[in-house]
Amino acid sequence: MKNGPRQRATIIDVAERAGVSKSTVARVLAGSASISDEARDRVLKAVAVTGYERNHLAVGMRSGRSGLLGLVIPDITNPFWAEVARGAQDRAAKDDISLLVFSSDWDAGKEATHLRALRRARVDGAIINPVADNFDDLDRFGLPFVFIGSSAERFPDTLSVGSDIAQAVRLGMDILVERGHPAPALMLGPRSRLARARFLRAVHEHCVARDLDPDILLAEESDYTVEGGRKAMGRLLAGPWRGSRAVFVANDLMALGAMIAVREAGLRCPEDISILGFDGIPAGAFSWPGLTTIEKPGRQIGIRAVECLLDQISGRPEQGRIFLPCRLVERGSLADVSVSAPARAAAGR
Amino acid sequence: MKNGPRQRATIIDVAERAGVSKSTVARVLAGSASISDEARDRVLKAVAVTGYERNHLAVGMRSGRSGLLGLVIPDITNPFWAEVARGAQDRAAKDDISLLVFSSDWDAGKEATHLRALRRARVDGAIINPVADNFDDLDRFGLPFVFIGSSAERFPDTLSVGSDIAQAVRLGMDILVERGHPAPALMLGPRSRLARARFLRAVHEHCVARDLDPDILLAEESDYTVEGGRKAMGRLLAGPWRGSRAVFVANDLMALGAMIAVREAGLRCPEDISILGFDGIPAGAFSWPGLTTIEKPGRQIGIRAVECLLDQISGRPEQGRIFLPCRLVERGSLADVSVSAPARAAAGR
DNA sequence: AAAGTTCATGGTAACGTTCCCACGAGCTTG
DNA sequence: CAAGCTCGTGGGAACGTTACCATGAACTTT
C-alpha cells in the first residue's frame, strides 16, 4: 500500500519550492497583508503541489493551544451521552477544534487515567461528567473545564451544563394533570443519586403550588434498570392504588420495564395504566405502546458545554451553571382520562 | 476559579528543582538504566512537587508520533457505531493512545473536512467508514488507515475490518430452518447498498447448499428505516404467503417496523408471523415481543480495527480483510413450529 | 602503572511553527 | 537631495522533548 510521500511536507519544503523564505510562507498562510501578489501565487502553488498541511503539533507547541478539547463521559454507548458527544463534536468542528473522547464507566480510576491523558495531550479544555466524589485535584487540575450531567451538582462552584430537572418535572406533572392524572405514582431512582433528590424536590414544589399533599403520592424506588423498573411496577400493582392509575417514572429504562410488568399482569398500557418516562432514549420509540416521555436536551448540552468552555478559555465572561429545558415527546403510553378529553379529541381532528 | 499554576511545569523546571540536567530527568522518565539512586530520587520528588506531566505535543513533534488515532464514523449517535467507537477507545487506551472521534453523517464533504483535521493533528493513523465513492485521495492520503463497515467493500485492496455477513446469514437461515421455517420471506435493503448484495448472495449460497430454489423465497425491499419496514411488511401481508410465515429482515429498524405492521394487521408475533432481525440494536430488547436478531460484533470491530492499525503503523505484518463473526441473540420474535418443538421444549426444561 | 572499560552525567541539535526584529528598495516629504 | 516611511522580505529565537555525543570519574585489566 503506497501512502504518498513518507514524510509530510513542511513549511520549509514549501518555501524552497516557492523560492521564498519560510517567513513569507507563514505570512501567506496566516493571510496577513504585505505580501506581493507574485509571492503569494508562488507560495499557494507550492502548497498545492507539495500537499502541505500545517502541523498542528508544532502550532500547538508554539502557540500553547493544541486545538483539542477533551470529553469524558460515562459511556459513549449510552444514547444520552452519545447525543452529548455529538453536540459537542458539531459545535467544536465549527471552530476547527477536534474532540478527544473517553468513556469512564463511572469508575474513578478510569476517570483519573483519562484526565491524565488529557493533560498530557495538552487539550485546551475538558468537558467532564464527574464520577469521583471528591475530585480533590479540582484546583490542581490545571485545565479549564466544564462539568456536565447531574453529578455536577456536587460541585456548586464550578461551571456546569445540565438539564433542567425542575422544569422537566413541572412539564411532566402538568401534562399528567391535564390528562386527568392529578396524583400519579412516582417511580424514583436510588437514594444515592443526586438526580433523585432533585426530581423529588421538584415534585414537592409542584404539589405545594397545586395545594396537594405530596405524601399522598404513591412512590416506589429502583435502580434505573429495565429489570428494576419491572419489579418496582410489580410492587405498585400489588398494593392498593385508587383513582386514575398513572406512573411518572424517573428514567426511560425503568419505564420500559414498568411497561413489561403491566403486560405481565394482564393489564394494558395506557388503557389501564399510564406511564410517563424521563430521558428520551431511542428505544422508547419502538416499544408498544410508544413511550411518552420527557426528553433531556443531550445534544444541546454538548453544544453549550463546548461554548462555555471556549468562553472560559478565551477569557470571556462565563455564566456559572446552565440548565437547559427538556421537551415532552408524546407517544402512546399516556391515556387522556380528563373530563374534557372527548371534547378535545373531537376538536382536535 | 483558580486553576493551579498558570504555566505547566516543563522538564527544565523539574531539572532545576532536582539540581540535575534535563538529560538526566529525561532518562529517569524514560526508565533507562545508568542513573544513580540519588539522582532518581531527587528527580522523582521534583516531578511530584511540580506536578510535571510530559507534554505530548512536544513528544509528538520530536518523535513523529502523536499518540493520537482518528475515528471517522457516520454518526456516534447510532448505537452500532457507538459500540465500534467504544471498542476502539478501550483498545487504544491500553496502549496509552487517545482517540479523536468524528461523525461524517454519510456526507462526503464532512468526511473530507474531518480527514483534513486528522492529517493536521498528525494522528498516527485513522479508522474510517468511507462514504465518498471515489476516495481518490486514497493514495495521497499519507496516513496509515483501516476501513470499517460494509462500505469498505468498495475498496478491495485496503485493510478493513467488518462483520461477516455471510456467516450471519448462515446463522440466521440455520436457526430459521431449525425452528421450522425452511423458506422464510426476505426483507432486504435498498439496491444501492453493498450490504444488500452480500446478504442476498449469502442467502443464495445457503439455498443451493440445501437444494432449495432461492427464487421461491418471497422478497421485499425497503430503506432500512422503521417506517420502511412497516410498509414492506404490509405488502408482504397483503400478498399470497403459504407455509410457516417467517421473515428474515436485513436490519433491526425494519424488523421493528415489521413488528408494528403485524400488530396493525391484527396478527401476533411470533404466533402468526416470526421475525428475525439483523444488527443487534438495543431497542430490539425492549420491543414486544423482544426481537430475535443477529448481532453484529460492533465492539470487536473497533478493537480489531485499532489492532490492525497499530500493526500497520509499527510495520508488523498485516492481514488484508478481516470479517468478524456475528452472534444470534434469541428473544421472543421467532416461533418454533418444527415437528420436534414439543419434544425439545419438554427436554429443555 | 598505563591503558581500556563502564558508569553517571551534561550539552546540544533537531522536530515545525510563529513572532519579532532587521534590512534594503522604493517612496514621499521638507 | 537627504531624511523619514512604507512595503516586502529574510533571519533567528523559542516552544518542550529526546537522541546522540562528549566528558570525567571510578574501576578493571594486562
Image (tube, coloured by chain):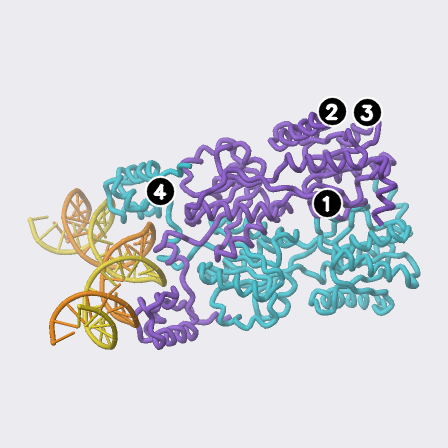
Chain colours: A cyan, B purple, C orange, D yellow
Within-10-Å neighbours for mark 1: few <14, some 14–19, many 20+: some
Q: Which chain carries label 4?
A: A
Within-10-Å neighbours for mark 4: few <14, some 14–19, many 20+: few
Within-10-Å neighbours for mark 3: few <14, some 14–19, many 20+: few
Task: Name which residue type carries label 1.
Answer: Val
Q: Mark 1 lies on which chain?
A: B
Name the residue that disc number 3 marks. Answer: B239
Same subunit: marks 3 and 2: yes
Same subunit: marks 4 and 1: no
Same subunit: marks 3 and 1: yes
Name the residue that disc number 4 marks. Answer: A6
Task: Name which residue type carries label 4.
Answer: Arg
Task: Name which residue type carries label 3.
Answer: Gly
Residue A45 in the image, given as x and y percentages of width and height: 32, 36
Q: Which type of secondary structure does the marked residue at label 3 adopt?
A: loop
Task: Name which residue type carries label 2.
Answer: Leu
Q: Mark 2 and mark 4: span between their CA atoms?
A: 53 Å
Q: Is residue A6 left or right of residue B73?
A: left
N-term-proximal mark, 3 vs 2: 2
Same subunit: marks 2 and 1: yes
Name the residue that disc number 2 marks. Answer: B212
Q: Mark 3 and mark 4: span between their CA atoms?
A: 60 Å
